[in-house]
Structure formats: structure tokens, C-alpha cells
Amino acid sequence: MPAAAVDKGQRIMQIREVMTVLFLAVMGWKDWKKKEISLLLTGTYGIIGLAFSIYAERPLEDWLLPFGVSLMILAVSVLTGGEIGMGDGWIFLALGTMLHTEMYVRMACIGMLIAAVYAGVLLVICKKGRKTEIPLVPFLLFGYLGGLLL
């Protein structure tokens, strides 16, 4: 493979990583402080992710798992009357357009594991109730950063 093609691929990966960290940091802050996400920013990130993936000729099968997981989260949000935030489903969908399946799964698993530990601390140590809401997006940021380090 020519060196120019490798450099181009490396630059695209670096741009994706920086954009994803910035996106998750901004959305995580909004989710933590205001308990809301920006659909405009999420949609913009998703469209950019779609463009990056098409440009990089990402195979169709690499889209299927992230798309399916995102639809499942959106469906669960509707079926539970919003107990799981619909914004989380839109975030997962946008991330699925940008991230390859391996990184997507790694980020989701690490992020949800950290969120579960945090929820356990709230339940056991802080004596919060089972209905206490916690934001998911900040934990996805930690999951993404952890996935980059693995």
C-alpha cells in the first residue's frame, strides 16, 4: 500500500477520533448538567459520520450492528415511555455512522459498565433510589477513551 494512502487513512482516523471525543464531551456535559442533548449537534455529527464512512468505503456489514443496537434503544425508549432516554438512542445512532463496529461495541460496553458501577455506588453508598436518573453520554465518553487506550 502506498505511503500516501496510509497517511490519508491515518489522518481520517485521527479526525474521527478528535471529532468523536469533542462530540461526546459536549454532549456529555449537556446530558450531565441539563439532562438534555442537542438533536442538531447529534444530527450534524451523524451526517458527518455518514460522509466519512462513505468516503472510507466502509462495508455495509460494518453498519448493521450499530444500526440495530440504535434502533433497539430507540424502541425500548418508546416502549418504556422514556425511562431510557430517546436522546441516548439518537446518540448511539450518530456514533454508529462514525465508528467501526469494533470500536462502537467497545465504547458501549465500557461506557455502560462504568455507568453501572456508578449507579451501584449511588444505590449502595449514597442511598439513592432505583428511579434515580443518571446520564449515559458522559460514560460513553469514558468508554470511548478507554476503547482508544485498549
Image: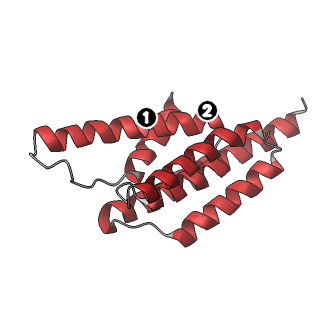
Q: What percent of the width, then of the height, locates residue 82?
A: 38, 61
- The answer to whether 73 appears left or right of 58 in the picture is left
Residue at 63%, 39% in the rendered image: 65
Q: For the residues marked 1 and 2, what is the alpha-carbon distance in whole angstroms?
A: 12 Å
Q: What percent of the width, then of the height, locates residue 69?
A: 56, 43
Query: Which structural element holds mark 2?
Result: helix
* Dots 1, 2 in contact, CB < 8 A: no
Query: What colouring style does the render use?
Result: secondary structure
User: Residue 130 or 150: which is nearer the viewer?
Assistant: 130
User: Residue 34 or 64: which is nearer the viewer?
Assistant: 64
Image quadrant assignment for residue 62: top right
Residue at 54%, 51% in the rendered image: 92
Inspect this view and state whether residue 147 appears.
yes
Inspect this view and state whether residue 25 appears.
no
The residue indicated by pointer 1 is: 110
Disc 1 residue type (three-letter):
Ile
Disc 2 residue type (three-letter):
Glu
Q: Residues within 10 Å of mark 2 (few under 14, many from 20)?
A: few
* Labelled disc at residue 2: none
Query: Which structural element holds mark 1?
Result: helix
Q: Residues within 10 Å of mark 1 (few under 14, many from 20)?
A: many
Query: Sequence-wise, which precedes: disc 1 or disc 2?
Result: 2
User: Residue 3 or 82: which is nearer the viewer?
Assistant: 82
Q: Is residue 116 above or below residue 70?
A: above
Residue at 61%, 44% in the rendered image: 68
Which quarter of the rendered picture does the N terminus lie within?
A: top right
Q: Is residue 39 above or below residue 7?
A: below
The residue indicated by pointer 2 is: 102
